[in-house]
Image (tube, helix red, strand yellow):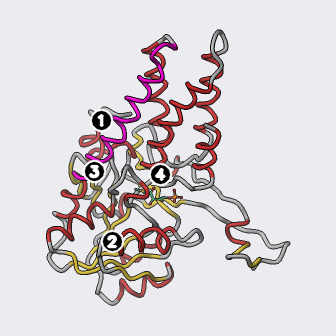
Amino acid sequence: METLADAIRTLAVRGAPAIGIAAAYGCVLAAMNAPRGAGFEEGFRRRLDILAATRPTAVNLFHSIDAQRRVFEEWKSVEGLENALLRSADAMREDDLAASRAMGRFGADLLKPGSTVLTHCNAGGLATAGLGTALAVIYEARDRGILDRVYADETRPLLQGARLTSWELDRAGIPVVVMPDSAAASLLRTGSVDAVIVGSDRVAASGDAANKIGTYSLALAAKAHGVPFYVVAPVSTFDMSTASGEEIVIEQRGREELAVTGNMRILPAGVGVYNPAFDVTPAALITALVCEKGIIHSPDRDSVGAVVTGMDRT
Ligand code: MRU
């Protein structure tokens, strides 16, 4: 289980839904690794706390660990618990795939024929149970024959766009052009992008959405140039207990991610770094939120509440 926790910490497993699903399986390992006998409950709960401390922003992590805690509380006995937790983790994985398919269909309805889409970070199969959030829309648009091409931000500093999104799309035969994050505003200004589509790590009750650092500036640029900005996220990424984006904890990552490029140390030793992993895009900049339950146009507290209430996986 420590290996799995480390994989989440070091981003070997990353992307909000994938983190949540991995953590659900981590809870199975926690049950397997906890000492038998009187110390079981304490050992099991301590391991769940270790998993919960791996990354702070993606709410899927906390939703899935809470769900597994409930399985433990309902099950009560150690006997059969591992199988119950495993069934629950399998169900989360299957639900996520089904959600991706539904989001792909809803999201593609927002696109016109011949669309060029700009995306940020990686919100594809490598971030989910296998299909994606933003990229599920792109795959569906391709299948419908309405997609022209995709621009992918390289996504500084860890390059999820350059390393993961370009690999996924190229492998799927989708024309993809990678660019520096800093090129996005000027590309949007040319009028050649029809929609910006991104995923999210946590959507607050207000509709404010946290996502990979750089998403907020992309949303501002999209607004300035009249390009629709869509956030695609399953219900498992909504956090109705967080009132607004201001309450979302933003993960700060280490100095080395900025100080070292490849094998080369590029920052002088005394220089400080500011390295937030995420930012928050206010709902007012989001043209629509897409989840597996449908499309929330011009999201706000009421519309988000109306669509998400009744969610059964949190
Ligand atoms: O730091 P990461 O790589 O885990 O950040 C991932 C993102 O920001 C994704 O865009 C988000 O999780 C949506 S994934 C479907």
Query: Does any atom of ligand 1 lie closer than 8 Å to the CB of label 1?
Result: no
Image coordinates of residue 217 in percent, x first then y, are 47, 72
According to the picture, the residue beneath numbered tag 4 turns out to be 245
Identified by mark 2, the residue type is Val
Point out the tag, 2 or 1, that comes first from the N-terminus: 2
Q: Report the magenta residues as a range.
A: 78-102
Residue at 68%, 71% in the rendered image: 258
What's the mark number on residue 311?
Answer: 1
Q: CA distance from mark 1 to mark 3?
A: 11 Å
The quadrant in which residue 146 appears is bottom left
Give percent across and percent down for residue 64.
Answer: 45, 35
Mark 2, ligand 1, within 8 Å: the answer is: no
Provide the residue designation for mark 2.
196
Our reading of the magenta stretch's main secondary structure is helix
Per the image, the residue denoted by label 3 is 291
Query: Where does the image place residue 36, in percent across and percent down from the top left?
Result: 63, 15
Q: Residue at x 60, y 23 (%)?
A: 44
Amino acid beneath label 1: Met
CA distance separating discs 4 and 2: 20 Å
Question: Which is more N-terminal, label 1 or label 4?
Answer: 4
Label 2, label 3: how far apart the Cα atoms are: 16 Å
Residue 299 on the magenta span: no
Q: Secondary structure at mark 3?
A: strand
